[in-house]
Amino acid sequence: MNKEDRAERTHRSDSLDWRETERGKMIETLNYLLRKARFQAQRKSLSDEMRLRWVNTMCYITQTCNSVLKDADYDELKREVERTKEEVTQLSEKELGKPEAVTGRDQSKASVSN
């Protein structure tokens, strides 16, 4: 692996770390807001209309939280694919004595043949 590849991987890693940190903050904030909305939705002193609005707010917060978590799952899957590609490349180098790059086409061929 050359210096440019290492630099690019480091940049991507730093970017992913930042996104994970920001996602964590978003999830914490959304959970806080969800607790507040749940409390308001359960208040008997509020009108039914207001309680319903708080329930709708809870639903919106939950959907937003699920979207953030779904994006996190996608990023983790991308990282796992990259790790697997690296592992296959390293094994190929050891086995054949020369580097063999793994591309998306190679992966689709492998999944069709299996």
Image: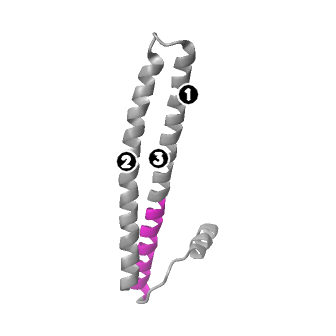
Q: Over which residues does the magenta segment extend? A: 77-96
Nearer to us of marks 1 and 3 is 1
Amino acid carrying label 2: it is Gly
Disc 3/disc 2 C-alpha distance (Å) = 9 Å
Whether residue 108 is situated above or below residue 46 in the rendered picture: below
Which residue is located at x 46 percent, y 47 percent?
69
Q: Secondary structure at mark 3?
A: helix
In magenta segment, residue 94 = yes
Q: In the rendered image, which residue does mark 3 sit on?
A: 69
Q: In the rendered image, which residue does mark 1 sit on?
A: 56
- Of label 1 and label 2, which has the lower sequence position? 2
What kind of secondary structure does the magenta stretch mostly adopt?
A: helix
Question: 86 or 36, which lies in front?
Answer: 36
Amino acid carrying label 1: it is Asn
In magenta segment, residue 34 = no
Q: Position of residue 26 (x, y in %)?
A: 41, 45
Count the marks: how many? 3
Nearer to us of marks 1 and 2 is 1
- Of label 1 and label 3, which has the lower sequence position? 1
Question: 46 or 100, which lies in front?
Answer: 46
Q: Position of residue 2 (x, y in %)?
A: 38, 86
Question: 77 or 111, which lies in front?
Answer: 77
Q: In the rendered image, which residue does mark 2 sit on?
A: 24
Question: 82 or 84, which lies in front?
Answer: 82
Q: Quadrant of residue 31?
A: top left
Quarter of the image containing the C terminus?
Answer: bottom right
- Of label 3 and label 2, which has the lower sequence position? 2
Disc 1/disc 2 C-alpha distance (Å) = 24 Å
Quarter of the image containing the N terminus?
Answer: bottom left
Whether residue 78 is situated above or below residue 29 in the rendered picture: below
Q: Secondary structure at mark 2?
A: helix
